[in-house]
Image (spheres, helix red, strand yellow):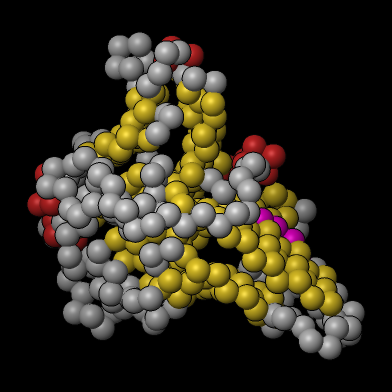
Amino acid sequence: MRRLLAGGTGLLVLMAGLVAVQPTSYAGAGPARVAVRSDHRIVVSWKGEHKRRVYQKSVNVPGIGTVDLTCRPRSTQIQIRPASRAPETQMWLAKFEDKQGRDVVSVKNVRVYTYATAADDGRGGTGPRAHEGLNQQSRIEDFQKGYAYGLVSQRPSRSQPGRGALTTPATSFELTWWWERFRHPGHQYCRMALTLHTDTARQFGLSWHGTAEGDVRSTSTTTIPGLGDAVVTCEPGAVGDQTVAFRPRGANQAAARLYYRVIEGEGDVDDQVTTASLGRDPDTGLLGPVELPRNGMMMLWATVNGVKRGYVLSSYYIVNNKLRPELNSCEVAATPLP
């Protein structure tokens, strides 16, 4: 899994100027998004014999806030701190670990928000920050290691329209951790590394809140440089489609392929991860469509004109609440892997 996901991006920080670009196309498009490309990396590393140990580091997440890494013998976590809890901020991650000799994975969605649903009066929200712990036991293990892939995205509050396509920068990340001898003061060791990648020119997604909005914003089409179009469909109703597809462009479209992994729930990797590969449909010209997870993540690799591009995608939707259609919602975000 890690070999497949390993990226070749450098760690140069490239922040584009605040140049408006064309928004993704969808019915009733909102404001143009801001062009951002950046790469960051932070490492928390210490040994028990060091006098000045650094247990925590922070890094900026463009357009959203900051992420903190903490590694202490009593606290091992990744934390999101958005600049405001008024929007709906989500940090999704798929954690891969060894658990009692088993390769396990768990999908986590860490949220910061004021309004949980359209019916929330504001008292059901979270605090200004939220985290995901990396330990498996309440008393942190003496030794543990693992890795995770994920993304941070943001959209309007669930008390407001989702406004369709992704206009706030989405940031992907890779996280690794290793600690040992936590129960032996003076001999302890910890190392966490976090790599983040933001590229708004190649991200895509779709958000709507309430069936009334979903009826007019059920599809988002984003042009991805060097790839083609990414098409997200999330229709309200029990028989609606909730899918993602790519429409490749270029001279050699027939050879285009899509490889994907769907990750949902928690348990053994073999049980929770579904993989498949498919070619371009000659009738529709699409790679896909592939069904979106209702509450989970996907890894997608599209190969077009001999170039492979990897994505991490989060997906959450409720589309079949007939009694309270205003509580239906769909939130999909995808951005290039780091």
Q: In this view, does 130 lie to the left or right of 112?
A: right
Q: Position of residue 246 (x, y in %)?
A: 37, 29
- Judge whether residue 174 can be spotted in this image: no
Quadrant of residue 201 in the image? top left
Q: Is residue 102 left or right of residue 278?
A: right
Q: Residue at x 82, y 74 (%)?
A: 189
Would you place residue 109 above or below residue 227 in this image? below
Q: Residue at x 19, y 41 (%)?
A: 26
Q: Where is residue 177 in the image (x, y as percent from the top left)?
A: 71, 63
How many labels sit on residues? 0
Q: Position of residue 328 (x, y in %)?
A: 20, 55
The residue segment tinted magenta is: 144-148
Would you place residue 82 above or below residue 234 in this image? below
Q: Is residue 67 left or right of residue 36?
A: right
Would you place residue 291 above or below residue 303 in this image? below
Q: Which residue is drawn at 72% across and 55% down?
A: 98
Nearer to us in this view, 102 or 66: 66
Please identify the quadrant where the N terminus is shown: top right
Q: Is the magenta stretch mostly helix, strand or loop?
A: strand
- Judge whether residue 125 can be spotted in this image: yes
Q: Is residue 68 one of those drawn in magenta?
A: no
Quadrant of residue 39 in the image? bottom right
